[in-house]
């Protein structure tokens, strides 16, 4: 992502965020708030996705183990 694109997106995000929070700030402060917020939000989102991915893997492992136990009890332990 280019620096210019980051500045434009940061300025827009900062403008929206400052208006939502009812903060009056100059253009430079708004841009800095937007860029810093984008970086912080991106970091938090990545951490949440990694944690969710690990949790999903854990749930998948449990379901896989339950399926194998069912198959073992149904087809092998029948004797």
Image: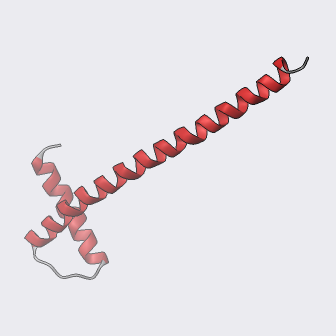
Work out whether residue 26 or residue 72 is closer to the camera in this orientation and state it. 72
Q: Is residue 49 above or below residue 61?
A: below
Left or right: where 12 falls relative to 3 = right
- What is the x, y in percent for residue 2? 13, 44
Q: Is residue 68 above or below residue 12?
A: above
Rendered image quadrant of residue 9: bottom left
Left or right: where 30 falls relative to 43 = left
Which residue shows up at 41% across the image and 52% down it?
48
Rendered image quadrant of residue 20: bottom left
- What is the x, y in percent for residue 68? 71, 26
Which residue shows up at 59% across the image and 36% down it?
60
Work out whether residue 76 or residue 34 is closer to the camera in this orientation and state it. 76
- What is the x, y in percent for residue 71? 77, 24
Rendering colour mode:
secondary structure
Q: Is residue 52 above or below residue 69?
A: below
Left or right: where 17 falls relative to 50 = left
Work out whether residue 12 or residue 77 is closer to the camera in this orientation and state it. 77
Q: Quadrant of the C terminus?
A: top right
The residue sitting at the left extreme is 28
Q: Is residue 44 above or below residue 57?
A: below
Q: Quadrant of the N terminus?
A: top left
- What is the x, y in percent for residue 62? 64, 38
Left or right: where 75 falls relative to 37 = right
Which residue shows up at 24% across the image and 75% down it?
18
Which residue shows up at 36% across the image and 53% down it?
45
The residue sitting at the right extreme is 79
Work out whether residue 50 or residue 45 is closer to the camera in this orientation and state it. 50
């Amino acid at each position: 992502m280019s620096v210019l694109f980051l500045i434009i997106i940061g300025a827009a995000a900062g403008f929206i965020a400052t208006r939502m929070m009812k903060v009056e700030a100059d253009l430079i402060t708004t841009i800095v708030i937007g860029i810093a917020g984008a970086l912080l939000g991106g970091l938090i989102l990545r951490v949440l996705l990694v944690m969710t991915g690990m949790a999903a893997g854990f749930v998948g492992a449990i379901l896989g183990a339950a399926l194998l136990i069912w198959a073992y009890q149904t087809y092998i332990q029948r004797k």
